[in-house]
Image (cartoon, rainbow, N blue to C red):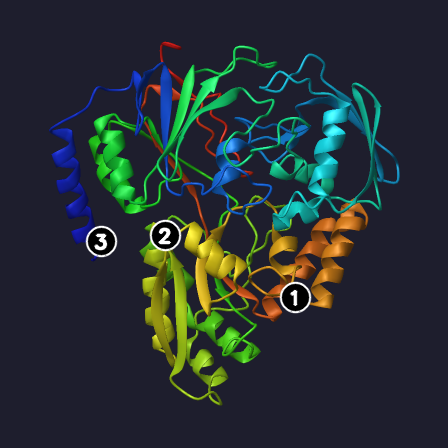
């Protein structure tokens, strides 16, 4: 369907919804019913579990962090580290020892106190077998943790780590109650401003504000996340009043219609989302570096952006970094050059059979259509395999490594070491050279980190490890009475507490 037909279909669909508007914005409308005094945010990908310690995927920390769980520090909208459960901290001159002064009077939602013993438990648990999420490696720099007293925590690192404290502001640094980890998949317990009220798997999550929260009270009494596999359905829900915000809008072509109506606020922020076309180097044909490089030349990334994201994405030149990262740069190494791609494939038998395992996400499905067309043009015989997300994609591609190619947005913050420094990760790269450069960037002098990271990125590009098609913008569409929605997606978290409706709580 071309863009004109797509917009026309949307307009017809919206017209049908507007003719039968629902009760409006004073209630939470979810699969479980309506609740007054809340805000509702529409999202695309639903979590398969609520336990990010054992289950991968960005949807879990997006819902849980800042709402249920908190860390010693947090990352603000500018990507800077701020105190949270720690009032302040000091760092030794050699960068190996941290001393945190913790907040007093903080409790978990089960009534247990947050203190240095709980912080020690949480950090050490990441390093234990209880955590199986691959990002647990971000806690590897820790050598020992000491609860000096109830509100003083000391952490000794094996060596300087320029990344460790920043990573503590992501879900790896979440604080857990020692007596609250028995059922993390369904009953999360944290120090955050909400407790989980209801979870309709695949449909919605509902939160209730804590009356005993240690910090500033949430701007709403209740909040809900509703999940829509179809971007038009999410937009329809906004138009009908069933949701207040469409966060990280998945079909930017709908903005033309939305802006024309003039009834909603539209903001565009930044994300850590690199939309990556992965090529499995564990099997043919992508065990051949020339085949991978041919793919890099065969893809017109701007065409993909125009098709999949209506021109709103950022072409990084295949660089797997966010424009917000301090080591970001735009590469010109792989311009669109189908003749160069054919030259690299000259000695490869054709057609080259390839299957793209495409997750059931709108941007991935749209991008895959353009990718297939351009790869066929240079000699690939490409088939699309629709893969349900998250469960099937995680099992088949992420864990099983049973794929030729795939397309997905990597939204974890500063995740190059995990993506390309870990040979067991689904992308399948992690050469000695890359691992050495990533290690030097982390453990070397802080003022050399950015330059060393750029060298690591250049090595990744030289190996054609993957093609970063574009960096995702964060498009937020909301009722104009709603304020406080975080526009920049800097870490995985989507804080709900700052979101309010004009006139205050109901």
Task: Report which residue position mark 3 lands on.
Answer: 3
Mark 1 neighbour class, 10 Å CA radius: few under 14, some 14 to 19, many 20 or more: some
Q: Residues within 10 Å of mark 2 (few under 14, many from 20)?
A: many
Image position, residue 103 (x, y; %)? 71, 17
Q: Residues within 10 Å of mark 3 (few under 14, many from 20)?
A: few
Secondary structure, mark 3, is helix
The residue identified by callout 1 is 459
Outermost residue on the right side: it is 93
Tell me what residue is drawn at x 29 percent, y 43 percent: 231
Label whose residue precedes the other's in the sequence (3 or 1)? 3
Tell me what residue is drawn at x 28 percent, y 40 percent: 255
**SS type, badge 2:** helix
Earlier in the chain: of badge 3 and badge 2, it is 3
Residue 289, x across and y down, in percent: 57, 77
Q: Marks 1 and 3: in contact by CB < 8 Å?
A: no
Q: Please give the residue where the numbered disc 2 appears in the rendered image.
A: 363
In this orientation, which residue lies closer to the viewer: 96 or 257? 96
Nearer-the-camera pick, 58 or 249: 58
Q: In the image, is residue 194 above or below residue 176?
A: above
Q: Quadrant of the N terminus?
A: bottom left
Give the side of residue 422 with respect to residue 47, left or right.
right
Task: Identify the mark at residue 69; answer none if there is no mark.
Answer: none
From the viewer's side, name the closer residue of 475 and 406.
406
Whether the residues at callouts 3 and 2 have beta carbons within 8 Å, the answer is: no
Whether 173 is drawn above or below 299: the answer is above
With 460 as the anchor, is 252 left or right in this view? left
Report whether residue 480 is seen: yes
Nearer to us of marks 3 and 2 is 2
Q: Is residue 235 found left or right of 427 in the rendered image?
A: left
Point out residue 92 in the picture as x, y percentages from the top left corner. 87, 34
Q: CA distance from mark 1 to mark 2?
A: 28 Å
- Identify the secondary structure beneath mark 1: helix
């Amino acid at each position: 369907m071309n863009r004109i037909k797509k917009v026309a279909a949307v307009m017809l669909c919206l017209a049908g919804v507007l003719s039968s508007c629902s009760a409006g914005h004073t209630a939470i409308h979810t699969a479980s019913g309506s609740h007054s005094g809340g805000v509702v945010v529409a999202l695309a990908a639903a979590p398969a579990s609520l336990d990010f310690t054992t289950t991968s995927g960005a949807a879990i920390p997006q819902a849980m962090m800042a709402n249920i769980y908190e860390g010693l520090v947090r990352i603000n909208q500018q990507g800077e580290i701020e105190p949270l459960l720690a009032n302040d901290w000091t760092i030794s001159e050699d960068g190996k020892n941290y001393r945190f002064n913790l907040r007093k009077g903080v409790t978990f939602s089960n009534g247990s106190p947050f203190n240095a013993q709980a912080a020690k438990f949480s950090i050490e648990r990441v390093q234990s077998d209880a955590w199986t999420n691959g990002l647990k490696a971000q806690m590897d720099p820790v050598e020992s943790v000491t609860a000096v007293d109830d509100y003083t925590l000391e952490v000794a690192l094996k060596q300087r780590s320029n990344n460790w404290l920043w990573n503590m502001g992501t879900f790896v640094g979440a604080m857990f109650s020692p007596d609250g980890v028995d059922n993390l998949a369904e009953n999360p317990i944290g120090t955050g401003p909400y407790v989980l009220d209801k979870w309709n798997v695949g449909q919605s999550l509902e939160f209730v504000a804590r009356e005993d929260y240690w910090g500033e009270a949430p701007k709403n009494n209740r909040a809900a996340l509703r999940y829509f596999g179809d971007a038009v359905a999410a937009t329809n829900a906004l138009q009908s009043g069933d949701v207040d915000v469409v966060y990280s809008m998945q079909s930017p072509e709908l903005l033309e219609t939305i802006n024309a109506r003039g009834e909603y606020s539209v903001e565009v922020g930044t994300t850590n989302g690199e939309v990556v076309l992965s090529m499995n180097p564990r099997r043919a044909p992508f065990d051949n570096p020339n085949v991978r490089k041919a793919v890099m030349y065969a893809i017109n990334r701007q065409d993909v952006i125009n098709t999949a994201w209506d021109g709103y994405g950022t072409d990084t030149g295949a660089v797997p970094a966010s424009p917000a990262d301090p080591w970001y740069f735009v590469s010109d190494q792989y311009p669109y050059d189908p003749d160069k791609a054919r030259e690299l494939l000259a000695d490869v038998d054709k057609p080259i059979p390839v299957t793209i395992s495409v997750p059931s996400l709108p941007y991935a499905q749209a991008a895959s259509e353009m990718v297939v067309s351009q790869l066929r043009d240079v000699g690939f015989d490409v088939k699309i395999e629709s893969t349900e997300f998250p469960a099937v994609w995680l099992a088949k591609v992420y864990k099983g490594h049973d794929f030729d190619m795939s397309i997905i947005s990597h939204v974890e913050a500063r995740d190059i070491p995990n993506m390309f420094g870990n040979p067991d990760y689904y992308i399948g790269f992690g050469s000695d050279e890359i691992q050495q450069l990533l290690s030097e960037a982390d453990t070397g002098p802080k003022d050399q980190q950015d330059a060393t990271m750029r060298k690591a990125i250049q090595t990744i590009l030289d190996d054609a490890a993957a093609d970063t098609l574009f960096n995702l913008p964060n498009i937020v569409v909301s009722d104009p009475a709603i304020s406080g929605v975080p526009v920049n997606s800097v870490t995985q978290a989507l804080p709900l507490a700052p979101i309010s409706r004009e006139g205050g709580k109901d």
